[in-house]
Image (cartoon, rainbow, N blue to C red):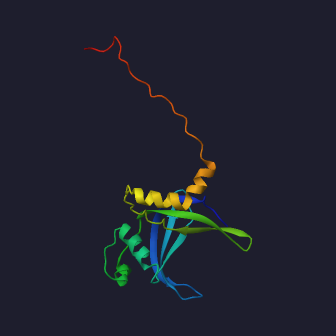
Amino acid sequence: MAHYEQGRHECKIRSHYFGESKVKKTPFLAFLFTPLVGEYEREVQCYLTPKTVDRTIAILRDMGWHGSRFSELEHVSFNGKLVELNCKHEHVNGNDYDKWEFPMPKAEIEAVNDSGGAKKLDALFGSELKKTATKAETVPAEVDEGGDDIPF
């Protein structure tokens, strides 16, 4: 049964352990935690596969761990560490359950003013824009003609 609202929650880590999924035997690193707005302990799993290991390492780095071997985590405590986690509701067998995950890292995007890129987009999607475009109204700019309140 889902106990928490969907969305981002600040949570306090209680402990962590290594395990593997029952069916595929995929290894994971699990964190037991309690959302600050609640009382029920929950678990979030970070799977360790060639496609997900970079994300799991990034999560560990964000939590302040700088080790070079997963076996070092056996001697590390994250107890009391505050993290943000996303809660979603998953519908299984007629019931809703809390499903927790670490938020995706914010991608650092460098703004590039590339008119060539905009022209390519016009070529691809310009006809769609034209279907809903309206002619912009021209509004004259207000001109400050000065006045008697200018001190010079």
Q: Which residue sits furthest left?
A: 152
Q: Which quadrant would residue 82 be assigned to in this image?
A: bottom left
> Which residue is more in the foreground, 55 or 40?
55
The x and y percentages for residue 55 are 43, 74
Residue shown at 60% from the left, 64% from the top: 88
Along the viewing direction, whichever of 132 and 28 lies nearer the viewer:
132
Please say if 39 is above or below 67.
Answer: above
Residue 9 visible in the shown view: no
Give the residue at x 50% y 71%. 32
Residue 131 in sight here: yes
Q: Where is residue 135 in the image (x, y as percent from the top left)?
A: 57, 40
Q: Is residue 113 left or right of residue 93?
A: left
The mark tally for this picture is: 0
Q: Is residue 149 left or right of residue 36?
A: left
- Asked if 3 appears above or below 15 in the picture, the reply is above
> Where is the C terminus found, in terms of image quarters?
top left
Farthest residue, direction right: 94
Which quadrant holds residue 73?
A: bottom left
**Quick one: 115 or 44, which is closer to the camera?**
115
Residue at x-position 55% and y-position 39%: 136
Q: Position of residue 45 (x, y in %)?
A: 51, 75
Q: Please identify the quarter of the rendering in which residue 124 is found.
A: bottom right
Left or right: 22, with 80 as reference point: right
Q: Residue at x 52, y 60 (%)?
A: 123
Q: Is residue 67 left or right of residue 109?
A: left
Nearest to the observer: residue 44 or residue 128? 128
User: Where is residue 16 shown, x and y percent of the image?
Assistant: 45, 75
Q: Quadrant of the N terminus?
A: bottom right
